Image (cartoon, rainbow, N blue to C red):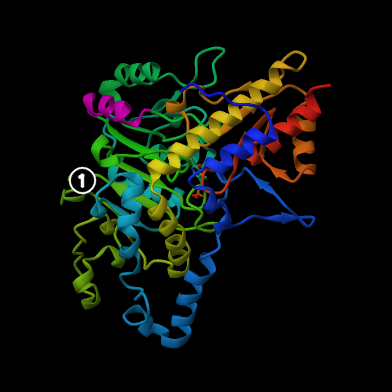
Amino acid sequence: MEHNFQNTLNYAQQLDEQDELKAYRHKFHHPVINGKETVYFTGNSLGLQPKTTADYVKIELDDWAKWGVEGHFHGTNPWMPYHHELLPKIAKIVGAKTHEVTIMNSLTVNLHLLMVSFYRPTKERYKIIMEGAAFCSDHYAMQSQVQHHGYSADDAIIYLEPREGEHTLRTEDILKTIEENGEELAMVMIGGVNYYTGQLFDMKTITEKAHEVGAIAGFDLAHAVGNAELHLHYWKVDFATWCSYKYLNSSPGGVSGIYIHEHHVHNTEIPRFAGWWGYEQETRFQMKREFKPSLSADAWQLSNVPVLLLAAHNASLDIFDEVGIPALRKKSDLLTAYLEFLIEDVNERCENSPLEIITPRNPEDRAAQISILTDERGKSIFDALTAANIIVDWREPNVIRMAPVPLYNSFEDVFKFAQVLEAVLVV
Ligand SMILES: *Cc1c(COP(=O)(O)O)cnc(C)c1O
């Protein structure tokens, strides 16, 4: 889409005026540093707190005080089935059926639990394809999984790397790597959105190709959930997991979610680690010795769920439910595009054009993130941003990563960022 963007405060404010989601900015607590509200661009690390979160958590604290253990069955939101209230909302966000999702543990734990079920290597077929530039925890999880099964990471893990001189992966190269390793490939396990570059992957096409060669397709959606449009069921993704504390604003260390395609959910042969919370709910408290799984992704739950974290999660999910991902994505595209325009505008007026956007330039290949590679001036840009109360993320060697989050960031926020860039770089 062609925009007629302008690098002026007036224009940024005009975009804010026309923003259908502008009221949501005020539904979040924005951190205040040195008495001044910050411009917060790190919602991809820890999302802001909705103003309703405290009330949701307070209800459960009060019920705990009032009911003690009876809160599991009485109380405002009985805790035993509490997470079931959240599942339709999370299913909508990831594009799944309600019985394909559940909420449990944290992300890396869930990666391991899902690989118990979906990484079933054989002598012929034991390799995993992942991003060379994956988030570190995913590297550790994959390495320890292949080692657990008696393989070496050097042999069993195939890393996807960008072409020389490029920063992101080409879908054609991902597909080619899958094809080339077809016979030996057990699993493709990549992020939905890469945490560093912000590249949004074509999960549908990757899943199709993985299936074509007889491999499983799993995704780590830490940076995709609540950010990009997802249709996991329709794409026939085998499994996925995500955390709730980034774009989903559900508290630091908040509870994670998983998705398992229904044909695996219904497969009685599938191996999984089990615990009592995965037991069929109606008869769970008979506490029988033999395990009878829930007929849903709940079967993968091990322990009773952390209710206070679920309450925080629920507060945020209600906001997402109200707004819906399509509306969010519509604003997100415009906000990210405006940020991109402003960065380019500053860069062009600046000696040696020191800024390179390493996030894909095609809006369909990215979501609410822009990563900029700079030169040695990077650190002074970062320091000037910090001094101006603008919070972004710094990654060595010279990358500034920022998330313009459509729920609570404004076009004026983005403009303020560009003003600092301009002050440092344009003399
Ligand atoms: C944030 C993130 C994690 C964090 O893992 P936790 O288990 O929640 O601490 C893991 N993987 C990716 C891709 C992430 O972006």
**Name of the residue lying farthest toward the bottom:** 66
Q: Do we see residue 205 in this rendering? A: yes
Asked whether 73 or 284 is in front, the reply is 73
Residue appearing at x 54%, y 26% in the figure: 359
Measuring 35% from the left and 53% from the top, which residue is drawn there?
A: 90
Examine the rendering and report whether any part of residue 403 can be seen. Answer: no
- Residue 378 occupies quadrant: top right
In the image, residue 335 lies at what x, y percent? 54, 35
Kindly identify the residue that appears in the image at 77 percent across and 42 percent down: 388
Q: Residue furthest right?
A: 427
Q: Is residue 124 placed above or below 261 in the rendered structure? A: above
Q: Nearer the viewer, residue 176 or 424?
A: 424
Which of the image's four quarters has the C terminus?
top right
Q: Which residues are magenta?
A: 202-214
User: Observer-nearest residue: 144 or 385?
Assistant: 385
Image location of residue 317, percent across then percent down: 42, 57
Question: Dominant secondary structure of the magenta stretch?
Answer: helix
Q: Which residue is mark 1?
A: 264
Residue 119 location (% of width, % of height) = 31, 39
Above or below, 166 against 245 in this view is: above
Q: Is residue 413 magenta?
A: no
> Residue visible at 21% across and 66% down?
280
The x and y percentages for residue 289 are 21, 71
Side of 346 where 405 appears, left or right: left
